[in-house]
Amino acid sequence: MYALPGQTLAECAEDLETALSFNTTHLSLYHLTLEPNTLFAKFPPALPDDDSAYEMQDLIEARTAQAGYIHYETSAYARPHRQARHNLNYWRFGDYLGIGAGAHGKLSFPHRVLRQMRHKHPATYMAQAMAGNAVQEQHDVGAADLPFEFMLNALRLTDGVPASTFFDHTGLPLHTISRDLAAAEQKGLLEADLATIKPTELGRRFLNDLQEMFLKG
């Protein structure tokens, strides 16, 4: 994790070199995010400014590439052919079953997509699971929300996704988001054609802005 409270570029570089020294096949390198309803959000620490955080990101991308890693997803770097299958499944809008306290799951059916969350507190989860009620919350993802949910995930992948998978996973024709695709292309954030939808380098740097373009108010 980088852009930590009080972290300098030199300290980020040292952390990265330590991680690389293990010669692992996969690295997950996350920019610190202060999540709502946490102690950090309530009492935010002094964080590196945006310019410093971008310098750290530039360093990470350059050094991992030099070491032979492919930056295949927003926060993931891997040796060739060693990308995490479960990561790729998430970002390609695949299904997964949540097991354990606080676990989330996504299940697709012919006419709907179901999201679930298990009880967060371990003791509550165990008691409810034994009673056959491990799921605390679940909801169907409506048709109007499916395009954003799909793009929210797909745009994290450096190589993007085949355009045909939009229909495969949402049941909606690609022209549903044609205006949004064109607007993102105009801004230089996206490359899209009949074969592939993928973020540009600029789009990867401003991923939140790019994803937001597919969010309907």
Image (cartoon, grey):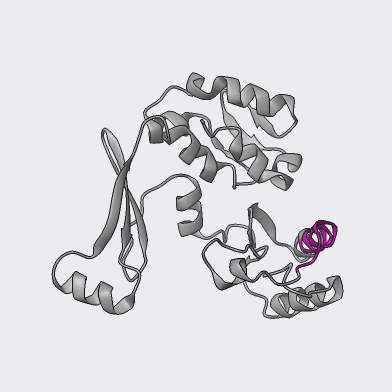
Residue 53 inside the magenta-drawn segment: yes
Residue 18 or 124: which is nearer the viewer?
124
Residue found 72% across the figure and 75% down from its top: 20
Residue found 60% across the figure and 47% down from its top: 157
- The picture quadrant where one finds residue 200 is top right
Regarding residue 193, the answer to whether it shows in the image is no
Q: Is residue 123 left or right of residue 162?
A: left
Q: Quadrant of the N terminus?
A: bottom right
Regarding residue 187, the answer to whether it shows in the image is yes
Residue 106 or 26: which is nearer the viewer?
106
Name of the residue lying farthest toward the front: 42
- The percent position of residue 80, horizontal first and vertical second, equals 63, 58
Does residue 60 lie above or below 178 as drawn? below
Residue found 56% across the figure and 72% down from its top: 39
Residue 116 inside the magenta-drawn segment: no
- The percent position of residue 201, horizontal first and vertical second, equals 75, 42
Count of marks overlaid on the render: 0
- The percent position of residue 4, horizontal first and vertical second, equals 72, 71
Does residue 202 lie above or below 100 as drawn? above
Residue 42 or 176: which is nearer the viewer?
42
Q: Is residue 30 left or right of residue 46?
A: left
- The picture quadrant where one finds residue 56 is bottom right
Q: Is residue 88 left or right of residue 106?
A: right
Does residue 47 lie above or below 74 as drawn? below
User: Which secondary structure dominates the residues rendered in magenta?
Assistant: helix
Residue found 70% across the figure and 45% down from its top: 204
- The percent position of residue 130, horizontal first and vertical second, equals 16, 73
Span of residues in magenta: 47-60
